[in-house]
Image (cartoon, rainbow, N blue to C red):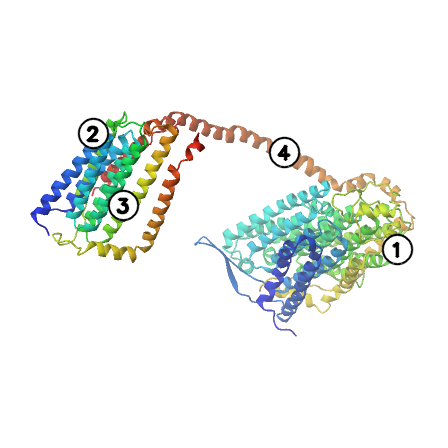
Amino acid sequence: MEQPAVIVAFYVLAGLTLLSALMVAMVRDLIHAVLFLILSFIGVAGLYVTLSADFVAVVQVLIYAGAISVLMLFAILLTPRSSRDNSSVSYSAPISVVAGLIGATIVYVALNTEWAKTADSSDSPFENTAAEIGKALLDPYVLPFEVASVLLVIAMIGAIILVRPGNEEDAS
Amino acid sequence: MISLEHVLVVGALLFSIGLFIALSRRNAVGVLMGIELMLNSVNLNLIGFARFVEAPRPIDGQVFAVFVITVAAAEAAVALALAVAVYRLRQTIDVDRLNLLKW
Amino acid sequence: MLDTIPENAVWAIFFLPLASLLVILFLPRSQATAAGVVAALCIGAAFVLSLWALDSSLQADGHPLSFSSHEWLNVGDVLEVNVALNVDGLTAVMLVVVTSVSFLVQIYSMGYMKGDGGYWRYFAYMSLFTASMLGLILFNSILMVYVFWEMVGLSSYLLIGFWFHRPAAAAAAKKAFLVTRFGDLGFLMAILLIYVHAGTFDIAAIQDLAIAGAIGQTVLTWFALGVFAGAAGKSAQVPLHVWLPDAMEGPTPVSALIHAATMVAAGVYLVARMFPVFQVSPDAMSFAGAIGGLTALSAAMIGVVMVDIKRVLAYSTISQLGYMMLALGIGAYVAAIFHLFTHAFFKALLFLGSGSINHATNTFDMRLMGGLRKTMPITFITFVIGSLSLAGFFPLAGFWSKDEILSDAWAHERYLFYIALITAGLTAFYMFRAIFLTFFGEYRGGAEPETGAVVATLSNQAPVSTEPGGFEPDPVQAHAAAGAPHTAPEAHHGPHESPWLMVLPLILLSFPAILAGFANYNHDIEHLLVGALPEGAEVAEPTFRMGVAIAATIVPAVGVILAWAIYHAKVISAESLARLFRPVHSLLENKYYLDVLYERVVAGFLFHKALGGALATFERYIVDGAVNGAATSVRQTASVLRYLQSGQFQTYGALAFSSLVFTTVLVLVLSPL
């Protein structure tokens, strides 16, 4: 499946993702930032497809580009008097240095490590990822799977309790 | 052709952009966006490793990514709820004004 | 003939009193009166098993029975301690002494302590003591001996201070604990020393190494002296004897069991157990003998002037323990343990008798007693039996053991023989002085029971200074004050015989006090004890010497006659004698001023002023200086560094990631990919 189209797609999608991510940092409006974030998420989902992880790509679109982004929009809309200008803190220059150094370090390590790669990287090792992930979740990873479900329930209850009206009265 | 290093470099760049956003945004939702980008770059790495690295069960990397997405969803829900709760108290979610816990 | 005792049965001897302790601890408080029965039953069972152990030991000729070894402590290659039970002749004799006396004292206590607020606590402590004492005897490792040695000290502390609301008792408990600690320090150092040089805690192995000459002479001497220091503390040898008379503040049955019959004999037992090691070192032997002789004589002299009957008995105990040490010092190992064996019975008898007297008169002051012969016939007869035995009159138990010591002393150390002989005379004198003062003449009133006691204590030891004739005439009030449900009201019109629970042990104990001497008639005990020694140890052969025996009978007889002449017939006035020997008399009455020396000079000046002052200075300027300096430097550093805590999590994140970069780069530089 290593066709030139895939390679082109990879580079285009990588560029799209990184550019949108940069735009998240650049744009002046927080709502716009969320929109660019969604674009970046979709780019990542596309990258997953080129890496033959179709199931994860779908999940990525559903959860990140769908649910989480909507949550963020809600959070922004529910905090109307807060700043909407996507401004930076006063010391963003040293932080950009730190971030750059981190990126450089990771790139250096990534390029200089002897990865135990598969012999023939031209072909994907997966036939049908959804079925394989399903089997993996229910056989070797059944315990983490159950724990994850408990975590989700707890997070849901926690979020409800946190934003429930009535906390207001307690606070005031 | 695509190789592991390509994926890793994209991941590294995405991570550092996310880190910059997470550390520099004034708005708490902005911080959260940065964190989500960082998580995405981690997932990208995991998928890349699953695709290119020799392993007894290659699908493990993708399963791991699914778990990360699950936890990220939970984290985002709680974090945004926190932001809303904080806003009710202080009428702001600017993190540089939420500095009660200092010397 | 019984089979050889199995290991589990020996374990049971040790665990039965512990089980009793646990049961008593978990008894519902409403059933607290069952504590005495529980303790007596458990220790009675241990006694029966001990007899079995003795029988097995007799069949084995006193040689150690073989039991499996258990790993107790294992610290890598550094330290490995195995423990095993050790039952040989010496152990068997001690087992029987401890469990039998303990059993009878428990029965006696059920009467004596009846109605006391701490009834169950008393029996819990007693069980703990018995278990510790049995542990001390039963184990083969010197480390285990030390553990139980300290536990015995602990239970002794608890029991001396049993009536802790009484300041004298609390102080006596503390004194006993602290004074014996000095000796224990020596014992501990001896254990460490021998471990360094012998590499084992196993007693038999140490003995074998010592006999084989594998350990240096100097080391052995120091080891023996350290062990002797521990023994001197526990067995109240000069100069560490001062705690024992004060320990009489505890309940009288405690004095009988712990401070007369068993625990104080632990020191003698320890020296006897280490006897082969002592033998290798003649210096340690003669030192032990000299200290023993000194203790025997000086304590007996104090016993002559004491007016508190329990203190007379206490000094008598010290004196007799000195006798045993003296015997060990001249190599008369068999005679020493034989004397320990007989002494346990008649001294327990005497103490229980004094408790019975106290029960009747509410005092221990002999000046307030008198004439009790008629009202307390059984106590009188048993007390006289005990005294005769202690004084060493033929054919009572004390005669045989004392005679063996004297005979060996004659053969080995002439000067110790004379000391022992004089002590024997003094012993007879003070015991019969006590008898004449207590049981003959007119009743001098006793003392009134302590009133308003917080805890209703039955054996109210009234202060010695109580005026004669102050006996409480109103029976109802006295009855209420003493909280004594068992005494009939009319009993308080005068002294009375004690309840059967107290009299029965007296009668039972007088049999061994009379007959225990015949235990060695066929050299049975000798075989047992010699069998316990390893190959190559030499023992002074006990031989009967008619001349010594006659001297040992005449000298105490003279003592008795003198006591009769002074205190009963009043041919010689005790007061004029005291005036005549005023300096000596006051020296003795003040116990050679040793207590004053210890309290004022050692504790007051040496420890408090000098050592304490130096330590306080060190504490104030060096320890406090270091602590305060550390605090100041931390505070000043923090006053700068705290600005890092900005409350902005993003700065924390930036710092964390910067340090991540720093460390990663550092790692990459140090070990490139």
Q: Amino acid at mark 1?
A: Thr
Determine the chain carrying the residue at label 4. C
Residue where numbered disc 3 is placed: B69
Return the residue nearer the eye: C622 or A142. Answer: A142
User: In 3D space, how far apart are the residues under numbered discs 4 and 2 (Cα atoms)?
Assistant: 80 Å
Q: Is residue C370 left or right of residue C179?
A: right
Q: Earlier in the sequence, mark 1 or mark 4?
A: 1
- Tell me: residue A102, above or below residue C517: above
Q: Outermost residue, bottom direction?
A: C1
Residue position marked by numbered label 2 in the rendering: A27
Do residues under tags 4 and 2 come within 8 Å of each other at their CB atoms? Answer: no
Write down the residue under mark 4.
Answer: C608
Instruction: Calculate the distance from the C-alpha at mark 2 to the C-alpha at mark 3.
Output: 26 Å
**Residue C584 % position (x, y):** 80, 41
Closer to the camera: disc 1 or disc 3?
3
Q: Mark 2 falls on what kind of element?
A: loop
Q: Residues within 10 Å of mark 2 (few under 14, many from 20)?
A: some
Instruction: Assess whether mark 3 and mark 2 are in contact (beta carbons under 8 angstroms).
Output: no
Q: Could you tell me how far apart the alpha carbons at marks 2 and 1 are, in whole angstroms?
A: 114 Å
Q: Secondary structure at mark 3?
A: helix
Judged by depth in the image, the label closer to the viewer, 2 or 1, is 2
Q: Which marked residue is nearer to the observer: mark 3 or mark 4?
A: 3
**Which residue in the structure is indicated by mark 1?**
C375
Kindly indicate the quadrant of the structure image that contains residue B24: top left
**Residue at image coords 26%, 57%:** A135
In the rendered image, the vertical position of residue C66 relative to residue C311, given as above or below: below
